[in-house]
Structure formats: structure tokens, C-alpha cells
Image: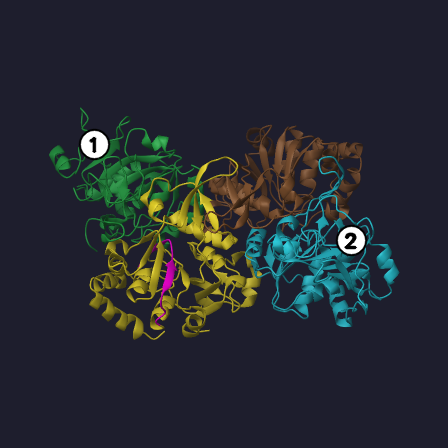
Chain colours: A green, B yellow, C brown, D cyan
């Protein structure tokens, strides 16, 4: 039995190519495990940066806090996050995983406020690296709760730059990088090359297309041959279980 | 020096205070609690990705303005004092990205009034933040964002070891701790261990914050509790969960403060 | 990898080359000699306070342009090749102060096209250098100097130890070595000792230049000779004196090169 | 018998007040020894920075290269020079010792070229930190060869900013710091408060006023009661001998 966390982690790991320089941020349990998974399977030469300021740690198990001391174990070096951001500014970072409280059809994200900025209904935590990095490097957005409160027609605030108003606007405005995929608990999404509108790439096993449509507050592009998300292999699952005996991977789904 | 004297002498009402650590790791919690016990007011607190430290100071009415990229209790939920005070417009918001906070501190460290950076464009964060302005490179014309320096009056940091002169050794992640110490006018450091001057002079390459940046040193084992301190201890997640639950109401937070701050002897 | 392959593959004619060390300390001399043996041309060399390394490259006709704050053989006199080639206008001069060289490299490291600094005003260096421009802070109006980034194509560095992946440990002064490695597109490092990966992973806080910045690693004990390498050896001042005397004439320098560079096996 | 190096070193050391943050640069043998002297005598709380990137080293003897490994011994920390310059930019550094190939009556210095800049008669080594620091912090200039080729009416090139054209010009231009003293092999010089013209403070024992005047290419202000430079004490001399057994202090006067 594959849990949704395990499936999402595997989807994230598969976005990492061998040799990529990848950054995992704070409160990013699934990306953390995805990085370790990728490095131990198909991407041994990836460079793994994280919020514990280390490079390529080899912890025997993962911590709950994704900036926690366990992520220092057997690292080859410390690197302050500032230096990683410098590398990003030089377009040397290939990927970062970012979250979103709201997302629109063009992959713009909100992590700042629900309601009016000056008089918010809900003050959210803030976007961390989002507003800087989404303008310059490729990103993967992960969303553990695919529903209409998250997938909205219009954002209350743009923290993270997606494809802005779609089409070539992002390019015209001189931004680099941009959202490559959105990985949720229901499906994997990408963006149409022309319009930059969100498109279903694959639906997770057991999920109905209807479920995805109903839980999305805007129209998704549905491709002709809808794929089913590839499951993790037995070996991948075993690795996840080994590296995460305390089920850190589930903390976005179940209360601790 | 003890906590009382360090905070009493070197943190003034109205100060801009940079706070070390990241998330629930190596926050200078003993110093934070002392700031609250001494009822400091109108602080402008500055940090990259913060948690309970910022939330406590805000909840205890110590804070006028908050410069941040993220404030959260991670899996334990929103930082409720942060949320409440901003929704009530009782705290001024200076919302940043991680790198713009870092750049603001780097500018202060270098003694320059701004630093140009190459991201942020088209984010509403850039639109609402008056401390960022779009500029062009005088050589290449490249479109950039100027980030205004944030000069901390004081930095609060927890570290591993130091000699009595304040030569600090950190063996864990630097976070913004070193940068903050370099950027601030004054720096207060709590440490787990006091080392001999001989040990420091034997291995000067281990010193991460030289004494020239350190105003006050306090020997305070477990000074980061309930956050983690690398090789010394992990975060006390049970306690942070308790904090998250307590702060769901203002009353709950008050009870928490009474028990774990005002009545705590340290 | 050996010297020949490292320089052959990663230094191209016309490259901007940042060179580590300071004065007669920890210059990457074996790499410098290999650049000369391979007859690289039109290089733009960059460093803060340099000596024999710059002077040799200039004398061997490898250099098109030199960015520097000082080039000297200290008590052994002027760097005569540097002096001659500039007086003959055969090398382009990009004269800096220490801090403006550092700022130009810092800008490259950060990926921004310029960095503002707060000195230089009223010096003729500012007047003659087209890579510096006076600007005003967009927030405060403060008068500043914008220093244009210098992006090295390659950095040449000598260090103490590394594992075979290129995680570098330096225990001496950082000089601009770390900054250059971070700023350059490619970095070639010679080291005194090769360490095991296990040693590196045991003490990650000792790694000063992580492998991500290192393109080529060459195990080259005494790779800094005749300059010093901290705990390993001091500078060979007798040899530097010999160099100073040889370079009083162009013929003398040629003889020196033949004997100590072209005929040297390393 | 006191050597001129020992006298100049003592003069330099006396410019360092207890608690000062002081930087010694490359090829600065006498300033290096002056810093160690001051720290061991009247200024135990000074902070000593140097070109070996260390703070407060305690070498058993001084090196010939003033960025040499000996200056790392028993330091309390390494600090890259970039960080020291950052401190200078924040006006936290109290003093740096700088040299000069030419100097004018207002303390402006030339370390770049003799002759025309684009077609120099002599290309000099360059000013190192000079052009940046002379605009922002107090400086002491040391000159081991006080003569008319060095003390000139007009500079060929201004590397280091002194009082510019004198009077209040430096202040008007918004510069901070400035030259406090010029210490030579003949005398100690300072600057008139109003005109900012160079003035004799004291003449070294055994030197005639005439000698100073003849060796200076412009008119010096001569105060009414001309002082004689204070000699080092026996204890100071002993310390210099102990810390400098190889006579590094003399390398600006005699060939090695």
C-alpha cells in the first residue's frame, strides 16, 4: 500500500535530474525526502542544498524540522543559504520546491494573506524564498490539499510569480525560470507551452478526473490521453521507510 | 554577565533587533524570554524564517514592526500571535523574501545604504514593500531591485562555545547568525560552553564570530530551548506543540507566558 | 587530474583569470607556471595585492589586461615586468583599491552587475577607472561609488587539503581565495594533501570551498612555491630575491623562465 | 643606540590609543611591529588586524612578509580583509598605516605613477587599500626616505586623498577620516587645523631643522617651540629586539 505522501515524494524526486543543483526549504518534509530519494536512486550527482545550511548530508533518518540538526550529519560542507541564493541569482540552481496557500491557473502563488493585504482576513506565514526565487529559477510547487480554497480563479496577493497573466508575459517581463510542475495529493499538473495555463499531466491511481475538476476553482486543460501517475517502486518505498522511520512524511496530512 | 544585565544594558525600547536561528533551530530563546520579562517595547524585529521566538515577542507586546520572510510554527500551525496582531493591525508589516532580508543585513554589514538584487520582479511583495525600489545598473542598464539596508541596533544569538572575551565558535549551520553579528551595532550571545582562551588561540580557524563583534556574552546552557542546538540537543517538539495549542487564544498565551517565561528562573 | 590537463582544458586564451593568495603567500605558482608553459594569451588577470605571480604572467606575454590594487615584490623592489609592460603600454591597466577589487568579485559572486561602495571619492583612481561610477542611493540619496562586477572565467587557487571530489580545506587566511572560487565560472585548485571523503564528512565545518565551486583538483605538494603555504612552508625569500634580480632586464627574465618554468618538470 | 627604524616604530605605536581598531597592510614591516609594540605596552585593548587575515596574533617573532604565516600564530580568529574593509566603511576602524611614493603639503599621496598616467615614466605598485580607505578613515602615513622626490609641490597623480586643496575642502566634499600624522626618518609631521598645511610636530634627535627643510619640496609650517621626538624606552627597545630578531624592521632602509 502506497501512501499519498510516498506517491507525492516519488513524483517530486522524479523531477530531479542527475547533476541538478536542488534546494529544499523550511517546513518542506516531502521535498527533503524526495531529495534524499533522488540522490540515492536516479540522481547520484545531484547537489542537495537545504535549510540546515549543508550540502549532501547523509542522515540515518530525517528530522521533523527540515532545518534540524539531523540534516547536518555526514554533510560535505556547510553553506549559508545566502550563498545558495547567490548561486540562484547566477542561474546556477536548477530547482527549488515551494508551497502555496493559493494558486491560480498560471501558477502564481499566494503565501501572504487571505483578503485585503492591509487588513487581512488571514495573515499567512509569508513566502520565505518564494518572491525572490520564483522570478529567476525553475520551481516545483507541491500542494498536499488540492481543493477549491487553494486552486482559485483569482489570488488575493501574488507572493510567487508564476506565468503572471499567461502567454508570453513572463518572458516579456524578463523573468527567468518559472513553475515546471504542480504536484498535489490528487494529480501532477504542468503548464501548456503556449497559453501557460495549467494542464493535467497525470492523475494519481484511484483518483477520478471528476474529483480533480471539482476540487479546482478554474478550468484545467485536460489532455487527450490522460496518464496515471507512476507508482514508486518497491525499492523506493523501502528507502523511504528506512530514511523516515518516524513518518515525518505524513505531517502535512495528519496532526502530530 | 547574566541574562538580566545583558538585556537590561544592551536592548533599549524602540531598538531594531535581529534574531538568530532558523525555524525551531538555535533561536536565542533565553534572551527572548528575558526581553519579555524586562517588558521591552516598540522593538523592530528582524529575521529570515522565524517561529516561536518572533511569535512570543509579538504576543508579549514587545514589537512595533516585523521584518520577515516567513513566520510559522511549521507542522504545529500558524504563529497565532503574529497572525492576530497583524490582522488587528497592531504590528507593522515589513514583508520580505529570504534573500531580501539577507541583502538588507548584508548592506548593513558592509556599511552601505542599499544592495541591488536580481529577483522579486512582478511579486506583490515588491509592490507593497517601500524598502525595495526598482533601479537600473549604471553600467549595463540591467533591471534590478534595490533593497534598503536594515541596521540592527542589537543582534541576539545563541551559539555553542566562546572564550571569555567573546570569540564565538559555532559548529552548526551559520544561518544569519554571523551576518547579524557583523551587521548589528551591538551583539548579545548566549553559549552552551565557555572555553579557555588557549583553546581559541590554538585553532583560530574555528572562531566564527570574533570578539570584535560581540558586546555581551552570557554562559547559558540550553539557552536555545525549546529550539534545537545542533550537537547539544534537538528541538523540544512536545513543548512547541504545547505552545502552539496554548496560543490559539490570547488567554492561553498569557497562561503560557506566566508559566514558562515570567515564573521561569534563568 | 594533472596540471597540464587542468590548465589545458579549463583556461582559454582571452579568459578573465582570478588568482588567489596575497603578496608572496599561497599564490598558485605551479598553475601559473603551467599557464606560461602552455603559452596562454590575452588573459585578463585579477587580484588584490599581488607579486611574482602577476609579474611572471605579464612578463611571459600571457596578459592583455590587469585588474589590481597593488603589484610589488615588497622589499625586493618593483615588479619589473609589470612596470615595463605598462610603461610600454603593452598591458591594459585597470587600477583599483583593495576594496573595489573585492567588491567587483563580490558582485560576480552574488550574480549582480555592480556593487555600491562608500569610499574612493576624490581619488584619481576613481577618475581614471571606467569601471567605477558615482551614483546616489535611491532611498537616502547618499553619494556612493558603483563598482562594476568582474566575473572571472576561471579562478586559480592553492590550498591545503581536499577530498577527491574537491571539497577544499584551507586552514590559513582566506585572502580572496574563497570569494574567487565562488565568483568564477570555473575553479582550478592545487592542494598539498588529498584527504579521504570520510575525513571531510566527519567535520563538514572545516570545508571552506565546497566541491560545487571546484572544476578541477590537482594534487600538487609545494604548489605554492616559492610563495608560502601557511603551516606547510614559508616563502622562499632567497628565490624571490633571485627572481627580483633576474627581472631587472628582459633577458634576465627570459633566462629565469627557461630555468625555473620551461625546464621545470612538475 | 636607537636605530631610525626603532624610532619610527615607536612613533607609529604612540599614535595607537588603547581600544583602537587598527589595520596593518601588506609590505608594512614597521607598522606591523608598531602594532605589536602598542598592544604589548600602552594599548592592550587595541584590536590588531593585518594582511594575514588574523586578529590579535601573538607570533614569537615577526615575518618578513607582513601577510606571512607567522602572523597567524596564536591569533584569536581569522577575518578576511574584506570584512575589515566593511568595518572601515562603517567607520569602525580607527587607524590604518599607509605608505607613499609622493606626498604633497596637504597629505595627498601618490602610489600609482611618476609622470603621465597613460604614459608613465615609472609605473609604481599601486595604492592597495589607499584610494578607498583614505576617503573614510583616519590614516598615518609613514615615509622612510624623507626627500624632495617624495615631498613634492605637486603630485603626478592622487592615489590617496589627503586634505585635497586644503582648508575645508575635504569636509565639503563629504570625506571622513583623513591623514593625522606623517612619520618620516627625519621628523613627525601633522596638519594645521585651519589651512590643513603640513606642520612639523617634532624633529628626531640628531636631525637639524635645516635638514628637514632642505629635504622637503614645499614650505612646512614650523611651530614656535619645536619639539624633539621622544625616544623609545629601554623596555620598548627590548621588546622590539625580542619580537624582531631577524631585523625585519630595517628592510625599508637596507637591502636584504
Residue A241 horizontal/vertical position (percent): 25, 46
Q: Quadrant of residue B245?
A: bottom left
Task: Report the Cα–Cα distance between label 2 and label 1.
Answer: 76 Å
Marks 2/1 in contact by CB < 8 Å: the verdict is no
Residue range (magenta): B39-51
Above/below status of D17 relative to B103: below
Q: Position of residue D75 (x, y in %)?
A: 60, 60
Residue C48 horizontal side relative to residue D229, left or right: left
Q: Which residue is mark 1?
A: A202
The local secondary structure at tag 2 comes to: loop
Residue A57 appears anywhere in the view: yes
Compare residues B86 and A238 and report the one nearer the observer. B86
In the current view of this chain or complex, which residue is farthest to the top?
A224
Q: Is residue B115 magenta?
A: no
* Callouts 2 and 1 in the same chain: no
The mark lying in front, picked from 2 and 1, is: 2
Q: Chain of mark 1?
A: A
Q: Which mark is residue D252?
A: 2
Where does the image place residue B164, in percent across and percent down from the top left?
51, 69
Left or right: B228 as drawn, with respect to B201: left
Residue A76 visible: no
| Residue C59 sits in quarter | top right
Amino acid at each position: 500500500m502506497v501512501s499519498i505522501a510516498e506517491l507525492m515524494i516519488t513524483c517530486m524526486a522524479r523531477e530531479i535530474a542527475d547533476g541538478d543543483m536542488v534546494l529544499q526549504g523550511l517546513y518542506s518534509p516531502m521535498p527533503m525526502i524526495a531529495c534524499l530519494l533522488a540522490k540515492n536512486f536516479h540522481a547520484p550527482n545531484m547537489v542537495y542544498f537545504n535549510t540546515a545550511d549543508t550540502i549532501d548530508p547523509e542522515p540515518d533518518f530525517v528530522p521533523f524540522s527540515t532545518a534540524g540538526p539531523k540534516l547536518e550529519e555526514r554533510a560535505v560542507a556547510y553553506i549559508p543559504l545566502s550563498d545558495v541564493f547567490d548561486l540562484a541569482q547566477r542561474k546556477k540552481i536548477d530547482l527549488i520546491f515551494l508551497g502555496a496557500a493559493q494558486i491560480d491557473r498560471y501558477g502564481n502563488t499566494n503565501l501572504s494573506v487571505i483578503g485585503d493585504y492591509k487588513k487581512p482576513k488571514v495573515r499567512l506565514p509569508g513566502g520565505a524564498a518564494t518572491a525572490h526565487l520564483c522570478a529567476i529559477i525553475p520551481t516545483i510547487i507541491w500542494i498536499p490539499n488540492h481543493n477549491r480554497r487553494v486552486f482559485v480563479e483569482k489570488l488575493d496577493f501574488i507572493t510567487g510569480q508564476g506565468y503572471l497573466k499567461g502567454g508570453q508575459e513572463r518572458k516579456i517581463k524578463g523573468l527567468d525560470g518559472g513553475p515546471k510542475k504542480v504536484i498535489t495529493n490528487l494529480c501532477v499538473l504542468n503548464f501548456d507551452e503556449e497559453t501557460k495555463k495549467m494542464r493535467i499531466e497525470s492523475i494519481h491511481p484511484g483518483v477520478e478526473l471528476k474529483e480533480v475538476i471539482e476540487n479546482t476553482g478554474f478550468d484545467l486543460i485536460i489532455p487527450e490521453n490522460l496518464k496515471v501517475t507512476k507508482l514508486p517502486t518497491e525499492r523506493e518505498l523501502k528507502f523511504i521507510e528506512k530514511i523516515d522511520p518516524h513518518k515525518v512524511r505524513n505531517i502535512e496530512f495528519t496532526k502530530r | 554577565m547574566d541574562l538580566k544585565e545583558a538585556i537590561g544594558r544592551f536592548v533599549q525600547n524602540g531598538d531594531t533587533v535581529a534574531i538568530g536561528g532558523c525555524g525551531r533551530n538555535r533561536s536565542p530563546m533565553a534572551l527572548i524570554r528575558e526581553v519579555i520579562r524586562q517588558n521591552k517595547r516598540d522593538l523592530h524585529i528582524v529575521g529570515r524564517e522565524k517561529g516561536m521566538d518572533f511569535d512570543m515577542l509579538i504576543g508579549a507586546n514587545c514589537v512595533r514592526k516585523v521584518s520577515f520572510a516567513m513566520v510559522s510554527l511549521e507542522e504545529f500551525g500558524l504563529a497565532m500571535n503574529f497572525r492576530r496582531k497583524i490582522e488587528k493591525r497592531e504590528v507593522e508589516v515589513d514583508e520580505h523574501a529570504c534573500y531580501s532580508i539577507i541583502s538588507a543585513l548584508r548592506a548593513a554589514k558592509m556599511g552601505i545604504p542599499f544592495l541591488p538584487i536580481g529577483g522579486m520582479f512582478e511579486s506583490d511583495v515588491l509592490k507593497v514593500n517601500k524598502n525595495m525600489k526598482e533601479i537600473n545598473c549604471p553600467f549595463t542598464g540591467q533591471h534590478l531591485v534595490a533593497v534598503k539596508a536594515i541596521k540592527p541596533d542589537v543582534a541576539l544569538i545563541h551559539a555553542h562555545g566562546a572564550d571569555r572575551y567573546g570569540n564565538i565558535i559555532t559548529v552548526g549551520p551559520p544561518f544569519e547568525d554571523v551576518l547579524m553579528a557583523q551587521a548589528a551595532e551591538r551583539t548579545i550571545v548566549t553559549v552552551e560552553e565557555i572555553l579557555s582562551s588557549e583553546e581559541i588561540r590554538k585553532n583560530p580557524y574555528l572562531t566564527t564570530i570574533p570578539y570584535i563583534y560581540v558586546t555581551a556574552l552570557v554562559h547559558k546552557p540550553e539557552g536555545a530551548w525549546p529550539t534545537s542546538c545542533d550537537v547539544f540537543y534537538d528541538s523540544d517538539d512536545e513543548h512547541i506543540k504545547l505552545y502552539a495549542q496554548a496560543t490559539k487564544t490570547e488567554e492561553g498565551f498569557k497562561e503560557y507566558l506566566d508559566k514558562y517565561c515570567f515564573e521561569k528562573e534563568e
